[in-house]
Image (cartoon, grey):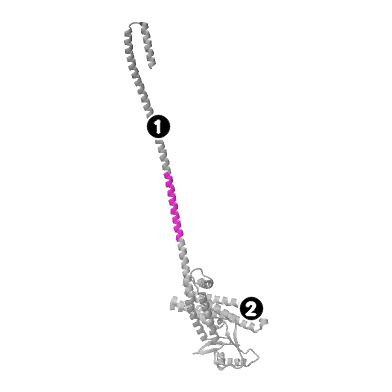
């Protein structure tokens, strides 16, 4: 069982490895961008700037597929940051794994942080299982995952997706006024789409793809070097592809959802 | 939090993720994308002005070329007119000179004819005078020698011979 330490603060549960990966991914994105934009020139760009402008043009292209150029330019930063954050987040989990395996005794606070669950009963149940794994000297012990794709965590993908969707709702209110906005919800299809379908499909698609990739990677790792090596290499290549495509899809869908709210023919 | 065992949804992590992403958005905008977009926009404008200025200079050169062509045509026409005029002048001059020469020749001829006529008249008058003088002389000589026919005859012959010689 893969565990991750959590803590509770004023009723909210925080997952420590996920937060670490969120910060790491953000830092990688930021440092990469700062590195690429160190020597900006109006003249013929080279190297890093070339790549950066290619990405910007790529994102602009996605946005302009669904909106006119002027409207699209408002959402370049969002699309650009989303694309890079999700892309790098997806690939970070493929680079390596940082797991710690615990046997025997761990401190009570660490045990509590690992066992923290939705309900007290679930927490108790989980704590028992962890203690069982800790006590089992033959098994792999209690494995704590410290390094993974942030996007392999539903909290992350839901946070990103809900943020984007709330932003699109906000844009619709600004564009059409609160009255028109609320009137749309009288249509049950629209209600279903906005309340259920979009908030579930957008984050779960990303999470499912990346999580599945990581599950299979850890499975292949556990099969040993002789059985798992070749499939692992193949699967890592495929996961890289999937991670790129999912970043593209998330960005594209974000632009589609925003365009539905800001375009005139609504 | 929603807990499904291996997968869970923690509100705290979500909140943290949202906050970090918003901060990332701001930082990316401020340090990377803002400057990059500004540079790209500046380049776009630069290219636009370059294109429009190239377009303008092309138009300018076109009008200049047309102007030059027009001027060249004008100059050509002018030169042609100039040459034509010179030709005409030359031919005019030619006829004038010819006419003058003809006139001068005619005048000279007339003058010469008049001179000749005058000379003839003069000579005639002179001859008449001389004939008259000779006649008088002859008469006086005849009167001197009287009726010597033979002598007269010889005198007249001599006289006539003299006249013939003189003439």
Which chain letter matches label 2? A
Instruction: Quote the CA–CA distance across marks 2 and 1.
Output: 120 Å
Q: Give x and y (percent) for residue B54.
A: 46, 61
* Residue at x-position 41% and y-position 36%: B95
On the question of residue A257 being in view, the answer is: no
- Asked whether residue B64 is drawn in magenta, I would say yes
> In which image quadrant can residue B3 be found?
bottom right
Q: Indicate the position of residue A174 as horizontal and vertical percent values.
A: 44, 77
Query: Mark 1 Cα within 10 Å, few/some/many (few <14, many 20+)?
Result: few
Q: In this view, does B35 lie to the left or right of A140?
A: left
Q: Which residue in the protein does label 2 denote?
A: A233
Residue A20 visible in rendering = yes
Query: A60 above or below A2?
Result: above
Locate residue B48, reporting x and y percent: 46, 65
B66 is within the stretch colored magenta: yes
Relative to residue A205, is residue A105 depicted above or below? below
Q: Is residue A144 above or below residue A88?
A: below
Q: What element carries label 2?
A: helix
Q: Position of residue B52 (x, y in %)?
A: 45, 63
The chain letter under disc 1 is B
Instruction: Determine the main secondary structure of the stretch shown in magenta.
Output: helix
Q: What stretch is highlighted in magenta?
A: B56-82
Dot label at residue B14? none
* Figure disc tally: 2
Residue B71 horizontal side relative to residue B144, left or right:
right
- Judging from the image, what secondary structure is the residue with disc 1 in? helix
- Residue named by callout 1: B102
Which is more toward the observer, B36 or A185?
Answer: B36
């Amino acid at each position: 069982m893969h565990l991750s330490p959590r803590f509770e603060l004023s009723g909210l549960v925080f997952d420590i490895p996920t937060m670490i990966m969120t910060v790491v991914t953000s830092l990688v994105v930021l440092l990469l961008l700062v590195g690429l934009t160190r020597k900006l020139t109006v003249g013929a760009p080279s190297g890093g700037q070339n790549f950066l402008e290619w990405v910007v043009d790529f994102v602009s292209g996605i946005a302009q597929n669904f909106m006119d150029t002027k409207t699209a330019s408002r959402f370049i930063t969002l699309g650009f940051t989303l694309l890079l954050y999700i892309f790098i987040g997806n690939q970070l989990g493929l680079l390596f794994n940082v797991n710690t395996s615990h046997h025997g005794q761990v401190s009570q606070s660490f045990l509590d942080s690992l066992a923290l669950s939705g309900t007290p009963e679930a927490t108790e149940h989980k704590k028992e299982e962890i203690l069982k794994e800790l006590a089992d000297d033959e098994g792999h012990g209690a494995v704590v995952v410290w390094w993974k794709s942030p996007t392999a965590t539903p909290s992350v993908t839901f946070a990103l997706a809900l943020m984007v969707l709330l932003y699109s709702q906000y844009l619709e209110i600004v564009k059409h006024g609160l009255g028109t906005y609320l009137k749309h919800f009288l249509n049950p299809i629209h209600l279903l789409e906005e309340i259920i379908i979009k908030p579930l499909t957008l984050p779960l698609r990303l999470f499912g793809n990346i999580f599945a990739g990581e599950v299979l990677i850890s499975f292949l790792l556990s099969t040993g070097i002789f059985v798992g090596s070749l499939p692992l290499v193949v699967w890592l290549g495929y996961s890289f592809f999937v991670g790129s495509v999912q970043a593209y899809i998330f960005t594209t869908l974000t632009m589609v959802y925003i365009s539905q709210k800001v375009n005139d023919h609504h | 939090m929603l807990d499904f065992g291996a997968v869970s949804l923690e509100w705290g992590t979500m909140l943290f993720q949202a906050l970090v992403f918003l901060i990332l958005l701001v930082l990316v905008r401020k340090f990377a994308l803002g400057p990059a977009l500004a540079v790209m926009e500046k380049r776009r404008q630069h290219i636009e002005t370059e294109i429009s200025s190239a377009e303008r200079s092309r138009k300018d050169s076109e009008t200049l070329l047309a102007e030059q062509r027009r001027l060249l045509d004008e100059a050509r026409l002018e030169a042609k007119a100039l040459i034509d005029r010179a030709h005409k002048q030359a031919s005019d001059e030619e006829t004038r000179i010819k006419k003058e020469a003809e006139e001068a020749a005619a005048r000279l001829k007339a003058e010469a004819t008049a001179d000749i006529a005058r000379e003839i008249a003069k000579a005639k008058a002179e001859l008449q005078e001389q004939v008259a003088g000779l006649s008088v002389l002859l008469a006086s000589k005849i009167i001197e020698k009287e009726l010597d026919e033979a002598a007269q005859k010889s005198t007249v012959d001599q006289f006539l011979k003299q006249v013939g010689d003189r003439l």
